[in-house]
Amino acid sequence: MSQTATNETQKPTEVTREGIIEKDGILIVSGEEYIYRVCSALASPTRIRILAELLRREADVGEIADMIKQSKANASTQVRRLEEIGLVRSEYRPGVRGVRKVVKTAVREIRIVLAPPEEK
């Protein structure tokens, strides 16, 4: 995976992985394997609810667990699934007792490209 990041006065961050490109808050997915991965992660109503909430605000895993009315362990598993394909990002911040994992959305739009790349 290669990353290109610039300071605030230049272009926004672009993250590229084989089959998945994130640029300016848009995730562009191509190739059967990668389309399957993204669609599989989006196939859960729970993960869709998490994404919808994270579009409005960042939240820690405990808040996400409360929101989806499930355990922190399950909330963490759901977040991990979204992280694996680049739909959310997390960071650790100081908490009342130790650290807390804060999650925010990485994208606001997903585009699936069904056509194979053109040969040059």
Image (cartoon, rainbow, N blue to C red):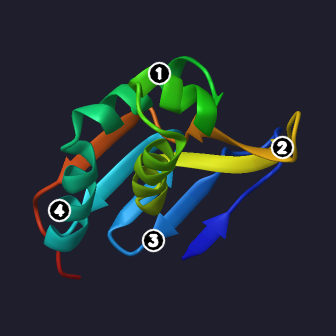
Disc 4 crowd, CA 10 A, few/some/many (<14, 14-19, 20+): few
Q: Residue at x 32, y 41 (%)?
A: 110
Marks 4, 3: nearer the viewer: 4
User: Which label is found at residue 93?
Assistant: 2
Left or right: 29, with 27 as reference point:
left
Marks 3, 1: nearer the viewer: 1
Residue beneath disc 1: 67
Which sits earlier in the primary sequence, circle 1 or circle 2?
1
Residue beneath disc 3: 17
User: Between marks 4 and 3, how big is the CA–CA gap?
Assistant: 15 Å
Total numbered labels placed on residues in the image: 4
Indicate the amino acid at tag 3.
Arg
Q: Secondary structure at mark 2?
A: strand
Left or right: 103, with 20 as reference point:
right
Left or right: 113, with 3 as reference point:
left
Residue beneath disc 4: 36
Which sits earlier in the primary sequence, circle 3 or circle 2?
3
Q: Residue at x 39, y 48 (%)?
A: 27
Disc 1 crowd, CA 10 A, few/some/many (<14, 14-19, 20+): some
Which sits earlier in the primary sequence, circle 4 or circle 1?
4
Marks 1, 2: nearer the viewer: 1
Indicate the amino acid at tag 4.
Tyr
Disc 2 crowd, CA 10 A, few/some/many (<14, 14-19, 20+): few
